[in-house]
């Protein structure tokens, strides 16, 4: 595979941008090699600057559930752009998209648009603190909620890939009120509440952990957290930036039958443009300025192009059976991967929910359990990172683009065809044959 143009651009990029990338997860630090510079995307495929074609299982880290450059989404963006790109004043599309979201989520009476998942979670934490008058928050190790100071402790995603337990430049005081608990550990969470009576403002959780690889919650975990929050007057914050309109329709809270106090959304609701949101019960959201004293703002919040892309995306995603079809294809992929691994006697842990999936290569230290990885601590211990790196490059060279890290989830789109899945599984067979 010729990669000269990517290599040239990477050289130039490194001179003007730290690590040559505008978000650390894009660098190939966890797998080695040169990041591919992407020239264009079409449906399930991306094409790099050397004109190599890849079947894309990253999909811009989740937003592109309809695939790249979906004609209806592009048409909506063109139409919006032709009328003006930003006004710093309210628009009808904001009301339209917010109304759809409020109607779909029983937990959301009111919501506020922001421009990134980071802003959504940062604002949700501030709101929980404003509403409860308390300062401490609980987050789970390996959970990634964007890059706000108080949440960059034992965080997943790029922090996991780079093995950074904490972030330089974050003052100790910023994370002093962040209490870290292992994911899926209800007992430890209960103890934290008991030791901090009347002090916990809220719990923030990725209902499905998708930034330490892919870990599903145990049956009692999310309901248990919900009960704990109610018992202790703390707010339950569901970070559905990644899982919303992805792992379940409209979110995992519906699937698990949980009514969180605050929900964070992003990725899919912006159809590939920078839109995110946080929302919840009316009495909580009324604390947000200008109604209340919790201040939060943004020049580009609710941007016309982003809301247009979001409206177009959700409209198509509502097509009967479409969501179920993408879900089915994702299950087919995961079952196929499990089968290939069995045939080649390579130990993996693989699972999916909706159109989100993940698989771990397990190392020799891993106990003989069906799903040995249930939290970040276990992921760090049992993941065979070297094997993932080898897998990644074998697949990349065959034209399949997976996340360049063993600690990220994967995604499917409506543009991925059955043939794409079958071809992917054939490539897995070939790759597993040569894995060391
Ligand atoms: N949530 C994204 C992947 N885990 C992060 C995207 C980014 O950091 O660029």
Image (cartoon, rainbow, N blue to C red):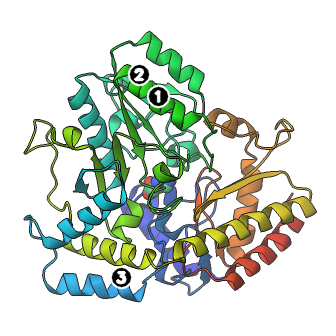
Whether the residue carrying mark 1 lies under 8 Å from ligand 1 is answered with no
For the residues bearing labels 3 and 1, Cβ distance under 8 angstroms:
no
Q: Say which mark, if any, is on residue 227.
A: 1
Residue designated by label 3: 73
Q: Where is residue 230 in the image (x, y as percent from the top left)?
A: 39, 27
Disc 3 versus disc 2: nearer the observer: 2
The residue sitting at 89% across, 59% down in the picture is: 342
Q: Position of residue 113 (x, y in %)?
A: 24, 57
Distance, label 3 to label 1, CA atoms, is 40 Å
Distance, label 3 to label 2, CA atoms, is 44 Å
Question: Which secondary structure, mark 3?
Answer: helix
The residue sitting at 52% across, 23% down in the picture is: 189
The residue sitting at 87% across, 55% down in the picture is: 346
For the residues bearing labels 2 and 1, Cβ distance under 8 angstroms:
yes
For the residues bearing labels 3 and 2, Cβ distance under 8 angstroms:
no
- Does residue 251 sit above or below 6 in this rendering? above
Q: In which quarter of the image is residue 51?
A: bottom right
Whether the residue carrying mark 2 lies under 8 Å from ligand 1 is answered with no
- Does residue 277 sit above or below 190 in this rendering? below
- Does residue 216 sit above or below 268 in this rendering? above
Disc 3 versus disc 1: nearer the observer: 1
Q: Is residue 141 visible?
A: no
Q: Which of marks 3 and 2 is nearer the N terminus?
A: 3
Q: Which of marks 3 and 1 is nearer the N terminus?
A: 3
Q: Quadrant of the N terminus?
A: bottom right
Question: Which secondary structure, mark 1?
Answer: helix
Residue designated by label 2: 231
Dot 2: few (<14), some (14–19), or many (≥20) neighbours within 10 Å?
few
Dot 3: few (<14), some (14–19), or many (≥20) neighbours within 10 Å?
many
30 to the left or right of 71: right
């Amino acid at each position: 595979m010729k990669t000269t143009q990517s290599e040239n651009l990477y050289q130039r990029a490194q001179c003007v941008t730290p690590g040559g990338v505008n978000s650390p997860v894009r660098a190939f630090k966890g797998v080695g090699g040169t990041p591919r510079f992407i020239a264009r995307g079409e449906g399930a495929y991306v094409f790099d600057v050397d004109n190599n074609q890849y079947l894309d299982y990253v999909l811009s880290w989740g937003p592109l559930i309809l695939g790249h450059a979906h004609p209806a989404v592009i048409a909506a963006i063109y139409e919006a752009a032709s009328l003006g790109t930003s006004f710093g004043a309210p628009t009808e599309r904001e009301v339209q998209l917010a109304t759809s979201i409020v109607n779909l989520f029983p937990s959301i009476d009111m919501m506020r648009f922001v421009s990134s998942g980071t802003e959504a979670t940062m604002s949700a934490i501030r709101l929980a603190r404003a509403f409860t008058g308390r300062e401490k928050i609980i987050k789970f190790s390996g959970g990634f909620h964007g890059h706000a100071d108080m949440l960059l402790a034992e965080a997943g995603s790029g922090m996991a890939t780079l093995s950074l337990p904490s972030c330089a430049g974050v003052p100790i005081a910023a994370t002093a009120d962040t209490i870290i608990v292992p994911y899926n550990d209800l007992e430890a969470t209960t103890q934290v509440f008991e030791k901090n009576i009347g002090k916990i403002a809220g719990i923030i959780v990725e209902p499905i952990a998708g930034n330490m690889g892919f870990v599903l919650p145990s049956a009692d975990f999310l309901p248990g957290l919900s009960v704990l929050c109610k018992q202790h007057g703390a707010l339950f914050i569901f970070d559905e930036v990644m899982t919303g309109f992805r792992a379940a329709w409209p979110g995992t809270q519906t699937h698990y039958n949980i009514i969180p106090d605050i929900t964070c959304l992003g990725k899919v609701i912006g159809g590939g443009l920078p839109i995110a949101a946080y929302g919840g019960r009316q009495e909580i959201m009324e604390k947000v300025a200008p109604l209340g004293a919790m201040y939060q703002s943004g020049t580009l919040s609710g941007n016309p192009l982003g809301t247009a892309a979001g409206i177009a995306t959700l409209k198509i995603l509502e097509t009967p059976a479409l969501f179920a079809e993408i879900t089915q294809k994702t299950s087919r992929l995961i079952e196929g991967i499990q089968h290939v691994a069995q045939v080649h006697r390579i130990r993996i842990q693989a699972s999916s929910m909706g159109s989100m999936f993940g698989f771990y290569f397990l190392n020799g230290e891993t106990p003989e359990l069906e799903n040995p990885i249930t939290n970040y601590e276990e992921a760090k211990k049992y993941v065979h990172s070297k094997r993932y790196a080898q897998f990644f490059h074998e697949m990349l060279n065959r034209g399949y683009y997976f996340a360049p890290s063993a600690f990220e989830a994967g995604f499917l789109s409506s543009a991925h065809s059955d043939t794409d899945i079958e071809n992917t599984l054939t490539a897995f067979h070939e790759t597993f044959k040569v894995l060391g």
